Amino acid sequence: MDKKPEVIFLSDMDGTLTPSRLPMEEHFARELEKLLDHYKFYIVTGSDLAKVAEQIPPNIISKVSGVYASMGNEFYVSGKKLYENEFTPEGALLEKLTFYRNNTKYPYELYPNFIEERCGMVNFCVVGRDCPLAARRQYQEWDDASKEREGIALELSAEFPKYDFSIGGSISIDIVPHGFGKVQAADRIRKIHPNEKIIFLGDRTEKGGNDYDLAQRLLELGNSEIVAVRDSTDALEYLRSNGFLHD
Ligand code: M1P
């Protein structure tokens, strides 16, 4: 089926298309699939492709036009990697992350995999990425009150000024060298689609959020609309009320 040429979509994943680190809801997938028959749709996420595959159903993945994974540090079309950025985090940074893990005031159990090295980035998670869902919720609640992640990100920004530290998900911090965050997807997608209007959906487009730089860069590049959503229900409401969902 020919896609409408004038508008393309770019969307964040966690908190926008799916709940954080959880699979896409079935009714949302049914609606999104209809949209994909008519419009080009790209995903941009801090997660790597393995996590994208856990959260987005295969029928949706096979229909999207591309996935900017690991903060845009790798790009996939039809499961094929078209580029990746190289990055080896320095020892001093990894040592400091280990220090934060060992000295956290979080009073409950910690789990393995607190430093996850992905293509072009590092994800740091005090409670440990391998935590079960209940511990994820417990840490999230505790962090909301204690603001541990905000404090760590601020301190790290002062000590390691050549990196960006952003709070994209619920329990972790994404770390990239300057310019190697989600923002890079803006120029790349504009290059592929010089004339189309780009509609970007994200749940962290406010200053300090990990969709902010990308949203701002799209606005600078022009012919773009930024849609700030709270969750996938909100995203669906936008798509429905703006006439993008066709039966
Ligand atoms: O896509 C948003 C974030 O999702 C996960 O965050 P968390 O585990 O903290 O909820 C991570 O994959 C993170 O890198 C990513 O930015």
Image: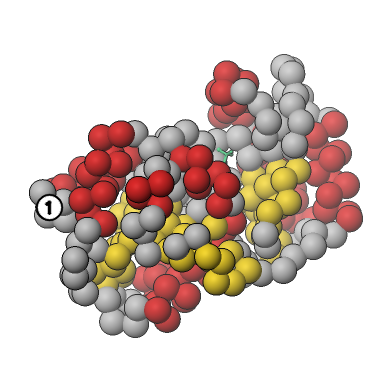
Label 1 residue SS: loop
Q: Quadrant of residue 89?
A: bottom right
The percent coordinates of residue 40 (x first, y second) are 29, 65
The percent coordinates of residue 110 (x first, y second) are 75, 24
For the question of whether residue 46 can be seen, the reply is: no
Between 224 and 161, the one nearer to me in the picture: 224
Q: Quadrant of residue 139?
A: top right
Quarter of the image with the N terminus is bottom left
> Would residue 36 appear left or right of 119 to someone viewing this image?
left
Between 215 and 19, the one nearer to me in the picture: 19
Q: Amino acid at mark 1?
A: His
Cβ(mark 1) to ligand 1 < 8 Å?
Answer: no
- Residue in the image at 20% along x and 62% along y: 38
Question: Is residue 1 shown above or below 137?
Answer: below
Q: Residues within 10 Å of mark 1 (few under 14, many from 20)?
A: few
The colour scheme used here is secondary structure
For the question of whether residue 127 can be seen, the reply is: yes
Question: Is residue 2 shown above or below 100?
Answer: below
- Residue in the image at 16% along x and 51% along y: 245
- Residue in the image at 50% along x and 47% along y: 52
The percent coordinates of residue 19 (x first, y second) are 42, 35
- Residue in the image at 85% along x and 59% along y: 90
> Would residue 176 appear left or right of 112 to someone viewing this image?
left
Please state the quadrant of the image where ligand 1 appears: top right
Q: How many marks do you count on the picture?
A: 1
Which residue was labeled with disc 1? 246
Question: Is residue 65 shown above or below 193?
Answer: above
> Would residue 143 appear left or right of 193 to someone viewing this image?
right
